[in-house]
Image (cartoon, helix red, strand yellow):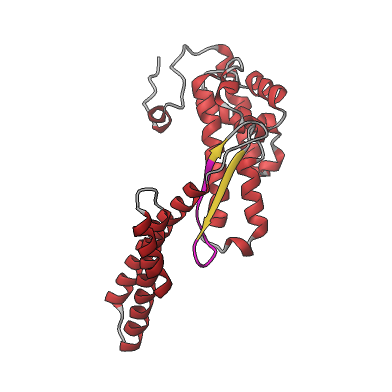
């Protein structure tokens, strides 16, 4: 018997426990090889939804015949996208999927969402509407309950964070504006700190007086934004008194 060395998939817990090799698992190798070759030579459009599910599953269930499992998933959920986005309990309910199969499908979903988010993170969101809608459709279209989602932008309309602030029922979700403001101020402070670090690094490398002066002016602008954010946080906080809020408001008006 040949012993298989533990690999990366084992460490992630994506492989099911070792099982005795069967005739069906040996015979499936040729089928899997042909599917891999078709994907690599003809591209993803040459692979049907159930075949794509089958390929994902046989990475996690290497000694199982994953074709019946893939077809069961298609019968239950209707498409590849619906299958990977399905709740964990629903996936586990499909015979043969198990923890390893469910983890593999959720890994694919996480990768897809991360790729979609990367398309909007470093670009002005409001000028990339199509990419934004594609991303939001990927994130929210298959949710079964209402959710209040907030896209936090910086001063250049770039996405700082995308967060589900609350989830509710099938037709209702609660919204707490104070929590939205509090989170916005936290992210603004984080964004300012990051920009300050970048500017300070650039200042250390500046070679001309005009370049240094330009960076120093940017740092002064950031300091002003930071002070505004701190005062706004005092005003929004539930822990500050009415007097403290009033003082912060007056200082904010003077800036």
Judge left or right: residue 124 versus residue 199: right
Total numbered circles:
0
Q: Residue at x 57, y 38 (%)?
A: 174
The residue stretch that appears in magenta: 154-165
Q: Is residue 255 visible?
A: no
Q: Is residue 127 magenta?
A: no
- Of residues 122 and 65, which is closer to you in this image? 122
- Of residues 85 and 240, which is closer to you in this image? 240
Percent position (x, y) of residue 173? 60, 37
Q: Is residue 196 visible?
A: yes
The quadrant of the picture occupied by the N terminus is: top left
Percent position (x, y) of residue 21? 49, 13
The quadrant of the picture occupied by the C terminus is: bottom left
Question: Which residue lies most toward the left here?
Answer: 204
Question: Which residue lies most toward the bottom here?
Answer: 209
Q: Considering only vertical position in the picture, is 127 above or below 136?
A: below
Percent position (x, y) of residue 207? 30, 83
Please identify the quarter of the rendering in which residue 234 is found.
bottom left
Please identify the quarter of the rendering in which residue 186 is found.
bottom left
Please identify the quarter of the rendering in which residue 143 is found.
top right
């Amino acid at each position: 018997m040949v012993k298989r060395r533990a690999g990366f998939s084992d460490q992630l817990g994506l492989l099911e426990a070792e099982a005795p090799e069967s005739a069906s698992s040996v015979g499936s190798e040729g089928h899997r090889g042909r599917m891999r070759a078709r994907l690599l030579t003809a591209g993803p459009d040459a692979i049907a939804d159930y075949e794509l599910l089958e390929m994902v599953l046989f990475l996690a269930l290497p000694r199982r015949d994953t074709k019946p499992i893939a077809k069961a998933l298609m019968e239950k959920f209707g498409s590849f996208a619906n299958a990977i986005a399905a709740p964990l309990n629903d996936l586990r309910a499909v015979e043969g999927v198990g923890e390893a199969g469910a983890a593999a499908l959720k890994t694919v979903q996480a990768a897809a969402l991360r790729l979609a988010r990367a398309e909007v993170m470093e670009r002005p969101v409001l000028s990339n509407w199509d990419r934004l809608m594609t991303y939001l459709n990927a994130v929210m279209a298959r949710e079964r309950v209402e959710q209040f989602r907030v896209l936090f932008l910086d001063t250049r309309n770039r996405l700082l964070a995308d967060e589900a602030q609350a989830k509710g029922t099938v037709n209702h979700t609660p919204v707490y504006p104070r929590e939205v403001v509090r989170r916005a101020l936290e992210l603004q402070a984080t964004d300012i700190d990051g920009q300050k670090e970048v500017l300070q690094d650039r200042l250390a490398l500046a070679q001309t007086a005009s370049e240094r002066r330009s960076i120093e002016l940017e740092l002064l602008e950031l300091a002003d934004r930071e002070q505004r954010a701190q005062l706004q946080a005092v005003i929004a906080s539930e822990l500050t008194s009415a007097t403290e809020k009033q003082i912060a408001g007056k200082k904010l008006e003077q800036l």
